[in-house]
Amino acid sequence: MLTAHEIFGFMSPALALEIVENIHATEKSIYRAAVAAVAEARKVRPVFLERKPRAERNQDVVASLCKPNLEALAVNLLQAWLLKCQTAMLADYLDALGIKHDKGMVDDLPASVPDDKLKAAIEGLLAKHQAQKVAVYLRAFNDLNQAKWPNLTALLDQDARLQLGA
């Protein structure tokens, strides 16, 4: 099981920067909160980071998201990115599993899903979406939710296409 900051640490730097950039574009308040949290963690004033060029500032945010002390921020950014920017992937996965949702948001997850349905859902995602984004989503889905499915954990550990950093 990975935590959100570990997910950020294992994904490619390019994807981590893409996530932060997407948050900047879609969720200004979350982005500003992220910059403020990074500034506090680095013991500098937020204006110090705000004055940097955005590309450099985003690299600072990504570097900080890999640290355990910003776990809550990492969770928040992952959730916001998935729900705002990856809605189609979430919907594809949940639809394939037959789980009712509202634009990727689920009220109640089943305690388990059949192996064949899970494998088919993952194959569908990998055929339609970038493998690393699928891996990040499935890691976050499995490791950061209350329902942990042993068959999904096994697939995440065994399938090379679902390895972060690969």
Image (cartoon, rainbow, N blue to C red):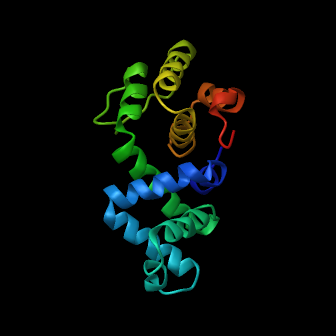
Residue 71 appears in the rendering: yes
Q: Which quarter of the image is occupied by the N terminus? A: top right
The x, y position of residue 18, in whole percent, is: 48, 52
Residue 106 appears in the rendering: no
The x, y position of residue 79, in whole percent, is: 43, 50
Q: Nearer the viewer, residue 9 or 127?
A: 127
Q: Which quarter of the image is occupied by the C terminus? A: top right
Where 26 sits versus 125, above or below? below
The x, y position of residue 15, in whole percent, is: 54, 48
Q: Residue furthest top?
A: 116
Where 33 sits versus 93, above or below? below
Q: Nearer the viewer, residue 26 or 80?
A: 26
How many labels were placed on the picture? 0
At 65% across and 41% down in the image, what residue appears?
164
Q: Nearer the viewer, residue 112 or 28?
A: 28
Lateral position of residue 157 relative to residue 95, left or right:
right
The x, y position of residue 104, in whole percent, is: 35, 36
At 37% across and 45% down in the image, what residue appears?
85
Q: Residue furthest left?
A: 102
Lateral position of residue 64 relative to residue 73, left or right:
right
Where 1 sits versus 98, above or below? below
At 62% across and 48% down in the image, what residue appears?
12
At 53% across and 86% down in the image, what residue appears?
44
